């Protein structure tokens, strides 16, 4: 594995847990298909090169990315970046502030979609916390 991929998998593991990261690693190592290439590039480029940059702390990068995926109307990405944002140190209140900012800048229909995705993300974080205790 490349250094960027290793770094990316480590961040991915911190955010989404051992099982999900291990599944991603296995996909990369055992395949040469569509899924393997997607996983490899995600780990190397997004997680290994972007999320390891130090000019923005991961918490701030999470705020920026969450705002972008809201503007792009990406329901699943909003959900996953809500989870990732909390793993990167954002509070629920800070994430809610991103939602409030999206309302006038992105529009109410998009904000409604974002709210639903964020609520799913919050529920997933709460579920994981309950399972860990």
Image (tube, rainbow, N blue to C red):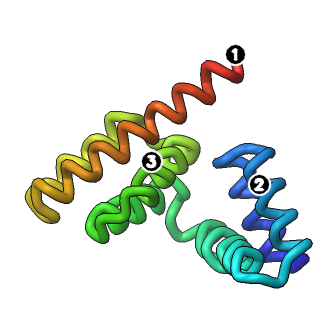
Name the image quarter holding the C terminus.
top right
Which residue carries the number 2 mark? 21
The alpha-carbon separation of the residues under discs 1 and 2 comes to: 21 Å
Q: Element under label 3?
A: helix
- Kindly check if marks 1 and 2 are in contact, taking CB atoms under 8 A apart as contact: no
Position above or below: 3 against 18:
below
Q: For residue 87, which quarter of the picture?
A: top right
Quarter residue 18 falls in: top right
Q: Residues within 10 Å of mark 2 (few under 14, many from 20)?
A: many
The answer to whether marks 2 and 3 mark residues whose Cβ atoms lie closer than 8 Å is: no
Say which residue appears at 36% left-offset and 37% top-offset: 119
Alpha-carbon span between mark 1 and mark 3: 21 Å
Residue at 36% across, 64% down: 74
Instruction: Of the two numbered discs 1 and 2 on the same chain, state the one appearing first in sequence.
Output: 2
Q: Which mark is residue 82?
A: 3
The percent position of residue 131, horizontal first and vertical second, equals 67, 22
> Dot 1 corresponds to which residue?
133
């Amino acid at each position: 594995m490349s250094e960027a991929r290793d770094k990316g998998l480590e961040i991915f593991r911190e955010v989404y847990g051992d099982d999900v990261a291990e599944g991603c690693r296995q996909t990369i190592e055992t395949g040469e298909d569509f899924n393997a290439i997607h996983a490899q590039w995600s780990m190397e480029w997004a997680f290994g090169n972007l999320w390891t940059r130090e000019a923005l702390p991961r918490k701030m990068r999470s705020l920026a990315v969450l705002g972008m995926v809201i503007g792009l109307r990406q329901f699943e990405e909003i959900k996953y970046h809500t989870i990732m944002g909390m793993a990167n140190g954002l509070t629920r209140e800070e994430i809610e502030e991103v939602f409030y900012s999206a309302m006038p800048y992105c529009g109410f229909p998009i904000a409604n979609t974002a709210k639903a995705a964020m609520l799913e993300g919050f529920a997933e974080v709460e579920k994981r916390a309950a399972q860990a205790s």
